[in-house]
Image (spheres, rainbow, N blue to C red):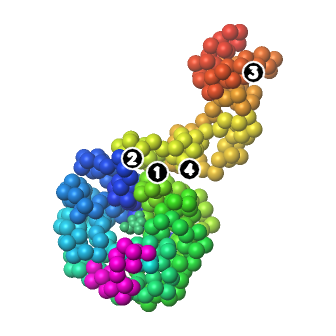
């Protein structure tokens, strides 16, 4: 069975950059955009040009530089937004305008003070207007996660007929459970005329920690584009994390999906975004966290030393991490201590190891993590240095 190609739409420079304190200047945005292109993302959403002159300028610059990935600009379903977005991406080799409107009851009545009929009219008009500037127009139904599926299907059918090439189904508030989000995509697949001629996109937020799971549920039910960010950064609890969705599709060969991402660049991409945005990555973050390939308990260390696969489902090299690490703490065992001794060039006999292990535990209780320097001092006491 051939693999199905899933498009990766990165929105680090738009949804990700909305995080308070994470705003980047144009030079920084260009650096991140170039790195995203090397990473192999299919689409990069690089800003919301109407929002500020600085954002307009950054989008315009990036549009003139990036040649491989599609460059996308966000707009509301407002003519002026669309004109400014179109102007900003005028020079892009592959331009896309992303326009849309809220479709849930709360968005229609409370935010927009409108009606369902008028929302459909505005969505259709926005897509038609965007089509007068570019061929590739993506429509988002904001808060689709809490939108009634029958009404959502009506909206999507209308914007597809108006010429949308991609339809984005955002779970804007991160409310859906994976099977609900999956059913939503399936419902659209089965009930919207013309849906097979367009790309269905997922856009999941992480308010309940389900953004990645929901994105995968969307794909399994027919979506072929995932919107995500590096390190999962984004509004509130963030967006689906690019490194997580990409590695899930790659590791689960049984699902038969592919992306164009060069996974060996994931770790350096994560570090770049973290440092530019001054946003540390939590140590236990899947794939790119400092502890993602670190083993500290004696049982796990013994297993990993015998065979990496006992406690690792990903080869760290695949994501650009040089090797798994054995962290020596008071929970570590003799196997890990002996392994580290050998690496440091000390040949420790079984009898000596008993003495060293007792000493090691005392140091570990005091220092929490035992460093190589501590071990060199310890083993130098009486151990024989190997040739
Ligand atoms: O979360 C959301 O609904 C969005 C849209 C603007 C696509 O970010
Ligand atoms: Zn979003």
Read off the residue under disc 1: 231
Residue in the foreground of this view, choosing between 124 and 200: 124
Q: Which residue is mark 4?
A: 286
Ligand 1 appears in which quadrant? bottom left
Figure check: 26 above or below 137: above
Secondary structure mainly formed by the magenta segment: helix
| Residue 111: x %, y % from top left | 37, 73
Element class at badge 3: helix
* Secondary structure found at label 1: helix
Mark 1–mark 2 CB contact (< 8 Å): yes
**Location of residue 333 (image quadrant):** top right
Label 2 element class: helix
Q: Residue at x 50, y 81 (%)?
A: 148
Tell me which numbered mark, 2 or 4, is placed earlier along the sequence: 2
Q: Is residue 349 left or right of residue 107?
A: right
Write the residue at 44% across / 75% down.
106
Mark 1 → mark 2, Cα distance in angstroms? 8 Å
Looking at the image, tell me whether mark 1 or mark 2 is earlier in sequence order: 1
How busy is the neighbourhood of tag 4: few (under 14 within 10 Å), some, or many (20 plus)? some
Give the image location of residue 313, x and y in percent.
64, 51
Report, in whole angstroms, how far the alpha carbon at label 2 lies from the one at label 4: 16 Å
Q: Is residue 264 inside the magenta stretch?
A: no
Q: Earlier in the sequence, mark 2 or mark 3?
A: 2
Give the CA separation, mark 1 to mark 4: 9 Å
On residue 357, the disc is: 3
- Residues marked 4 and 3 touching at CB (< 8 Å): no
Which residues, given as a range, are shown in magenta?
A: 106-126
Q: CA distance from mark 4 to mark 3?
A: 32 Å
């Amino acid at each position: 069975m051939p693999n199905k190609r899933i498009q990766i739409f990165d929105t680090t420079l738009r949804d990700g950059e909305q995080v308070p304190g994470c705003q980047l200047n144009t030079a920084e945005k260009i650096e991140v955009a170039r790195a995203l292109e090397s990473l192999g993302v299919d689409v990069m959403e690089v800003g919301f040009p109407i929002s500020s002159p600085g954002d307009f300028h950054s989008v315009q610059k990036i549009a003139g530089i990036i040649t491989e990935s599609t460059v996308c600009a966000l707009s509301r379903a407002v003519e002026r937004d669309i004109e400014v977005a179109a102007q900003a991406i005028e020079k892009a080799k592959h331009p896309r305008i992303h326009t849309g409107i809220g479709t849930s009851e709360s968005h229609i009545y409370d935010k927009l003070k409108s009606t369902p009929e008028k929302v459909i009219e505005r969505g259709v008009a926005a897509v038609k207007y965007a089509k007068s500037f570019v061929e590739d127009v993506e429509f988002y139904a904001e808060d689709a996660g809490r939108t009634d599926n029958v009404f959502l299907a009506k909206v999507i059918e209308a914007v597809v007929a108006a010429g949308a090439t991609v339809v984005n189904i955002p779970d804007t508030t991160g409310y859906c459970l994976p099977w609900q989000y999956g059913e939503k995509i399936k419902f659209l697949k089965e009930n919207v005329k013309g849906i097979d001629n367009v790309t269905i996109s997922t856009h999941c937020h992480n308010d309940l920690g389900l953004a990645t799971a929901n994105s995968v549920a969307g794909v399994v039910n027919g979506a072929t584009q995932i919107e995500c960010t590096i390190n999962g950064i984004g509004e509130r609890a963030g967006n689906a994390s690019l490194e997580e969705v990409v590695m899930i599709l790659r590791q689960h060969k049984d699902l038969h999906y592919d992306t164009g991402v060069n996974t060996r660049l994931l770790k350096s991409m994560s570090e770049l975004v973290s440092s530019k945005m001054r946003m540390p990555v939590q140590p236990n973050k899947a794939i790119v966290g400092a502890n993602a390939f670190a083993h500290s308990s004696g049982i796990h260390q013994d297993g990993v030393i015998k065979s990496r696969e006992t406690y690792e489902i990903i080869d760290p090299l695949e994501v650009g991490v040089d090797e798994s690490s054995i962290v020596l703490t008071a929970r570590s065992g003799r196997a890990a201590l002996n392994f580290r001794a050998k690496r440091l060039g000390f040949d420790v006999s079984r009898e000596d190891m008993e003495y060293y292990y007792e000493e090691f535990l005392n140091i570990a209780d005091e220092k929490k993590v035992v460093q190589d320097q501590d071990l060199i001092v310890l083993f130098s006491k009486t151990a024989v240095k190997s040739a």
